[in-house]
Image (spheres, grey):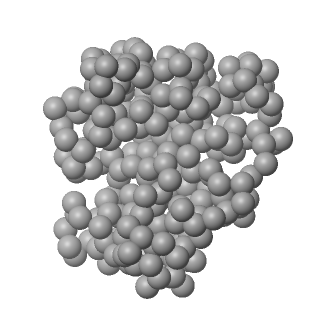
Amino acid sequence: MLNIENLCCGYGSAMVLHELDLHVNEAEVVALIGPNGAGKTSTLQCIAGHVRARSGSVLFGGKDLGPLPPQKRVLEGIALSPEGRKLFGDMTVRENLVVGGYSRPRQATARNMQRVLDLFPRLSERIDSLGRTLSGGEQQMVAIGRALMAEPKLLLIDELSLGLMPKNVDICYQALRRLREDGIAVLLVEQNLSKALEFSDRAYVLTSGRLAWSGTSEAARSRRDLVESILGHGSAEAQPQEAELAA
């Protein structure tokens, strides 16, 4: 579905990503992991079209996305749930979700919103609440739901569990399992290694903007010493979850 070859991108004169090769198959979940500053977010932003590639190619369904702006990439079937959620704080949950479906026919709005509310029943209770009043977990549900309103074939999620309470992390992963069963592919940036490697089919490890390791998530789980040495810290189980706060 997604095929990236020799991708380089950056900001201004600074090059962030160097000759990255990566692919995602249909209905596959791929984890993108690495330390802060490794280029994970830049990879997602480049796929979504918010950062221009300096060189290399991004193919989606065999089509070169290079010339396409972000809104055209949404139409092709790519949607991003960004790091930090980035909701419209003075808009309601309902309004935030409707914004996510701007690229789809108006008659699809009710159907897609019901799909989101089925995935995240908590949002039905908060549907008329302002985005800024939600907890971090509720905001993450809205951010994922907003992306789903665009009916993506590939869902990009940046830092799903960052700052969330464990129960809300579990709710989000349960929703992703249902999406995978429905045939939606997911490229996931995740700081919780245990969750990322448990849920994904394959994993890529980035360090300093370069691919350091790739393989099946099963292989990564059996070689935790490899992953931990690349990331430079102990196991994910030892990392405490932050207190959940509204952004």
Image coordinates of residue 46 in percent, x first then y, are 34, 33
Determine whether 229 is above or below 44 in the image: above
Determine whether 32 is above or below 227 in the image: below
Determine whether 98 is above or below 82 in the image: below
User: Would residue 193 be visible to someone looking at this image?
Assistant: yes
Residue 203 falls in image quadrant: top right
Left/right placement of residue 95 relative to residue 184 reads left
**Quadrant of the rendering where the N terminus is positioned:** top left
- Residue in view at x 38 percent, y 75 percent: 90
Image coordinates of residue 71 in percent, x first then y, are 21, 49
Q: Which of 72 and 60 is in front in this view?
A: 72
Left/right placement of residue 108 relative to residue 123 reads left
**Farthest-out residue, right:** 238
Please tell me how many numbered marks the rendered image carries: 0
Left/right placement of residue 22 relative to residue 59 reads right
- Residue in view at x 72 percent, y 60 percent: 243
- Residue in view at x 57 percent, y 66 percent: 246
Residue 218 falls in image quadrant: top right
**Farthest-out residue, front:** 13
Image coordinates of residue 25 in percent, x first then y, are 44, 34
**Farthest-out residue, left:** 67
Determine whether 49 is above or below 55 in the image: below
User: Would residue 204 be visible to someone looking at this image?
Assistant: no
Q: Nearer the viewer, residue 77 or 229?
A: 229
- Residue in view at x 54 percent, y 62 percent: 247
Q: Nearer the viewer, residue 9 or 182?
A: 9
